[in-house]
Image: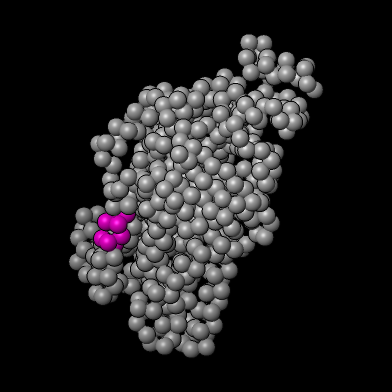
């Protein structure tokens, strides 16, 4: 059963079309990567899926036929709890907030004004599963980039049990932390959370996802990752991205990539 | 010193000013934490100028000052928020437009009618005599409501302030928080303006939050510290103002500056110790 259905979405900013006639659907348990060059409309598409930006035309249907994009229907989002990991650059650098305060704020989609014991438990177990429980009382702005990203992931986990949206979750992280982050997201997918992730890291997208949406204003490709690997589009994209992710000789992804380059490029 | 305090407390107008001032300072500082962090610091300044314009017009036509200025300033707050969200005029520029515009209209109305008399002077720089019985009860009532609303919505205010996109994407119920903050800010500005002065009231919003952020690094601690600090600064301010006969608004602001410098030093020393 599909939990998100996009039908003929077109989105524009200040009269400029960013996304044109995009249709695709996401099933429960999928791991979808949205790839494409800068300016191809990935983030804009995600903002529309989240109900943050209204589309010019088309619909985003959540599971039982709730239209989020058009009207941001409140009851709709209550039924389908969404977790979201935004690009970190959107956050202020000097914001005074403890890790616990931030993670707890993810549980606020439950009704009520004050945090219940259940919500606190949820926050603690989210921090525990991401290995940041010992940072609970620390100040968010004094953490490293990787730790901050885990805090935001823990907050997203508190908000959802079924869908997680991630906008470039590894941007700015070092190779080791990047790998840890990917493994964490994989684990979450394995316990049944649907993942929708924007990524510039095409190798990782091929390695971890089971569906790919290749965006270039309109849909260049949508289908399973296996199918995508066979397309020319993938070959082209793999060979032309800059060499920024070569770690060391032990890195499995990098080695695969090197072999791939030798064979195809 | 005890003699001076007893003497102060024997004047009903001073007691009224003290109670109102402390309550309004606390309200302003609570809202201020969110406003400063959302980069809306200047909203208080803009709204106070609009308030001045409204008060000037009310005085000129002998209308009830609060009845005119509260709705006008609330409307201006909504307008500022909408300008911020929708158009190409950025927030800071929008505030400057509305603030100078309202000030200009106020000054024109004043010069065409009454001229700059003592009332107008007091609106600009504040007066300890400003709190009559009506505004005393209105201020107390409004402050209590604002503090209760703030406590009720504290968690949601934090969520919206920290990350508006996340909150809007995941929580359908947080959409009204913005409007609530703007509304409450407008009310605090109008009520505090005649005591502190239209040109100085926004200090009550900005200083306690910024000062607390020098030392404290969690939202709760910053909020609690800002509330306590603002109350202490106001009490000290009104005391100094009475003892040395200087204007109360300006004195409170200067005490806030001193508090800022002290917290700034404490923050620096703390960082230095960590290294």
According to the image, what is the colour scheme of the structure? one colour
Q: Which span of residues is magenta-colored? A: B143-150
Give x and y (percent) for residue A139. Answer: 43, 33
Q: Which of B163 and B182 is in front in this view?
A: B163
Left or right for B91, reference A215: left
Q: Is residue B239 above or below residue A220?
A: below
Secondary structure mostly seen in the magenta stretch? helix
Question: Image point 65% across, 25% down: which residue?
Answer: A203
Front one among A122 and A205 = A205
Residue farthest toward the front in the current orientation of the protein = A1
Quarter of the rendering occupied by the C terminus of chain A: top right
Horizontal side of A198 relative to B145 (left or right) equals right
Membership of B145 in magenta stretch: yes
Residue at x 63% of width, y 18% of height: A253
Q: Does the magenta stretch include residue B71?
A: no
- Of residue A76 and residue B53, the one placed in the foreground of this image is A76
Image x and y of residue A263, in percent: 77, 17
Decide which of B191, B258 is in the foreground and name it.
B191
The reply to whether residue A265 is in sight is: yes
Q: Quadrant of the N terminus of chain A?
A: top left
Tell me how many marks there are. 0
The residue drawn where x is 28% and y is 48% is A112
Find residue B112 and report its horizontal and vertical position in percent. Answer: 52, 88
Above or below, B198 against B111 in this view is above
Query: Which residue lies most toward the right here?
Result: A265
Q: Can residue B22 be seen in this view?
A: no
Find residue B144 and report its horizontal and vertical position in percent. Answer: 26, 60
Which residue sits at x=53%, y=53%?
Answer: A59
């Amino acid at each position: 059963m599909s939990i998100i259905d996009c039908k003929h979405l077109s989105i524009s900013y200040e009269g400029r079309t960013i996304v044109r006639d995009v249709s695709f659907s996401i099933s429960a348990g999928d791991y979808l990567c949205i790839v494409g060059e800068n300016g191809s409309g990935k983030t804009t598409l995600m903002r529309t899926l989240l109900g943050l930006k209204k589309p010019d035309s088309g619909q985003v249907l959540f599971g039982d036929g709730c239209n989020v994009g058009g009207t941001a229907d409140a009851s709709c989002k209550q039924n389908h709890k969404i977790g979201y990991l935004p690009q970190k650059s959107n956050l202020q650098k000097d914001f005074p907030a403890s890790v616990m305060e931030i993670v707890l704020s993810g549980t606020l989609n439950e009704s009520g004004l004050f945090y219940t014991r259940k919500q606190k438990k949820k926050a603690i177990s989210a921090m525990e599963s991401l290995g940041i429980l010992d940072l609970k009382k620390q100040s968010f702005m004094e953490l490293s980039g990787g730790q901050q990203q885990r805090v935001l992931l823990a907050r997203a986990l508190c908000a959802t049990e079924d869908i997680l949206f991630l906008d470039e979750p590894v941007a700015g992280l070092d190779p080791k932390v990047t790998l840890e982050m990917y493994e964490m997201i994989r684990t979450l997918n394995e316990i049944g959370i649907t993942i929708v992730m924007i990524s510039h890291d095409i190798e990782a997208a091929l390695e971890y996802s089971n569906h790919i949406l290749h965006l270039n204003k309109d849909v260049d490709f949508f289908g399973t990752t296996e199918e995508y690997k066979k397309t020319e589009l993938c070959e082209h994209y793999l060979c032309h991205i800059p060499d920024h992710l070569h770690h060391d000789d032990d890195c499995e992804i990098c080695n695969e990539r090197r072999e791939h380059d030798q064979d195809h490029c | 010193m005890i003699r001076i305090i007893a003497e102060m407390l024997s004047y009903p107008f001073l007691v009224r000013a003290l109670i109102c001032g402390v309550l309004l300072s606390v309200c302003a500082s609570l809202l201020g934490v969110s406003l400063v962090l959302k980069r809306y610091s200047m909203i208080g300044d803009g709204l106070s100028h609009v308030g001045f314009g409204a008060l000037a017009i009310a005085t000129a036509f002998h209308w009830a000052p609060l009845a005119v200025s509260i709705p006008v300033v609330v409307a201006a707050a909504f307008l500022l928020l909408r300008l911020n969200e929708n158009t190409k005029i950025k927030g800071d520029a929008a505030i400057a437009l509305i603030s100078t515009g309202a000030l200009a209209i106020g000054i024109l109305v004043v010069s065409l009618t009454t001229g700059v008399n003592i009332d107008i002077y007091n609106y600009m720089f504040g007066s300890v005599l400003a709190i009559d019985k009506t505004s005393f009860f209105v201020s107390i009532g409004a402050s209590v409501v604002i503090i209760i609303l703030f406590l009720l919505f504290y968690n949601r205010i934090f969520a919206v302030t920290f990350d508006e996109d996340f909150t809007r994407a995941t929580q359908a119920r947080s959409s009204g928080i913005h409007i609530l903050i703007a509304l409450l800010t407008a009310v605090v500005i109008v009520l505090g303006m005649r005591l502190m002065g239209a040109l100085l009231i926004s200090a009550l919003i900005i200083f306690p939050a910024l000062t607390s952020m020098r030392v404290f690094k969690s939202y709760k601690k910053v909020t609690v510290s800002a509330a306590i600090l603002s109350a202490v600064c106001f009490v000290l301010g009104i005391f100094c103002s009475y003892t040395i006969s200087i204007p109360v608004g300006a004195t409170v602001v200067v005490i806030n500056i001193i508090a800022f410098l002290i917290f700034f030093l404490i923050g620096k020393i703390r960082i230095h110790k960590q290294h």
